[in-house]
Image (cartoon, rainbow, N blue to C red):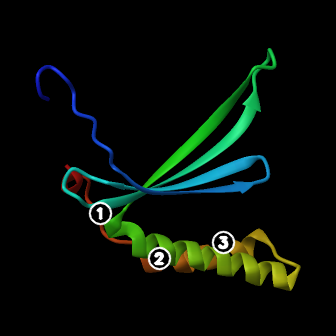
Amino acid sequence: MEDGKMSVRNDEVYSKAIRAGKRTYFFDVKSTRGNDLYLTITESKKKANDTGKQFYEKHKVFLYKEDFEKFVEGLQHTLDVIKDLKDKGDFTSEEVGSSYQEHKESLLTDVKFEDLA
């Protein structure tokens, strides 16, 4: 802060908007004060309240660089499962559950809440 004026930090590095039906997805790359990069994924959906006034409902996910690889791996696996199930044309929650359980076990790590502080 100089001379009582607050400095504005522009941490936005890149942004991509994807319009998909009633939703818009924003992929925003931002930088931290330490110049690390992270990704925010925002889902924005236009809605109307009881009086008909329109507003945007937003949901946001923050994804940090140390999680990129696991996130992409999990997303790709999930998309592959969806494709396989759609190709079969006949699937049950048991099939999805067993595939999910196998993948979940391969990603689990021993996390202690004390380590998060």
- The answer to whether residue 98 of the structure is visible from this angle is no
- Seen at 81% across and 19% down, the residue is 52
Q: Position of residue 42 (x, y in %)?
A: 55, 49
Question: Quadrant location of the N terminus?
Answer: top left
Q: Is residue 84 left or right of residue 39?
A: right
The tag on residue 97 is: 3
Q: Furthest residue to the top?
A: 51
**Amino acid type at image mark 2:** Glu
Could you tell me which secondary element the residue under label 2 belongs to? helix
Could you tell me which secondary element the residue under label 3 belongs to? helix
Mark 1, other Cα within 10 Å: few <14 / some 14–19 / many ≥20: few
Q: Position of residue 109 (x, y in %)?
A: 34, 71
Q: Position of residue 12 (x, y in %)?
A: 38, 51
**Amino acid type at image mark 3:** Gly
The residue that disc 2 covers is: 105
Vertical arrangement, residue 60 with respect to residue 111, above or below: above
Mark 2, other Cα within 10 Å: few <14 / some 14–19 / many ≥20: few
- Seen at 48% across and 51% down, the residue is 61
Q: Position of residue 11 (x, y in %)?
A: 33, 48
- Upstream in the sequence, badge 1 or badge 2? 2
Q: Furthest residue to the front?
A: 3
Vertical arrangement, residue 102 with respect to residue 36, above or below: below
User: Rounded to the nearest whole Å, what is the CA distance between mark 3 and mark 1?
Assistant: 23 Å
**Amino acid type at image mark 1:** Val
- Residue contact between numbered discs 1 and 2, judged by CB atoms under 8 Å: no
User: Rounded to the nearest whole Å, what is the CA distance between mark 1 and mark 2?
Assistant: 14 Å
- Residue contact between numbered discs 2 and 3, judged by CB atoms under 8 Å: no
- Upstream in the sequence, badge 2 or badge 3? 3
- Seen at 72% across and 36% down, the residue is 46
Could you tell me which secondary element the residue under label 1 belongs to? loop
Q: Quadrant of residue 66?
A: bottom left
The residue that disc 1 covers is: 111
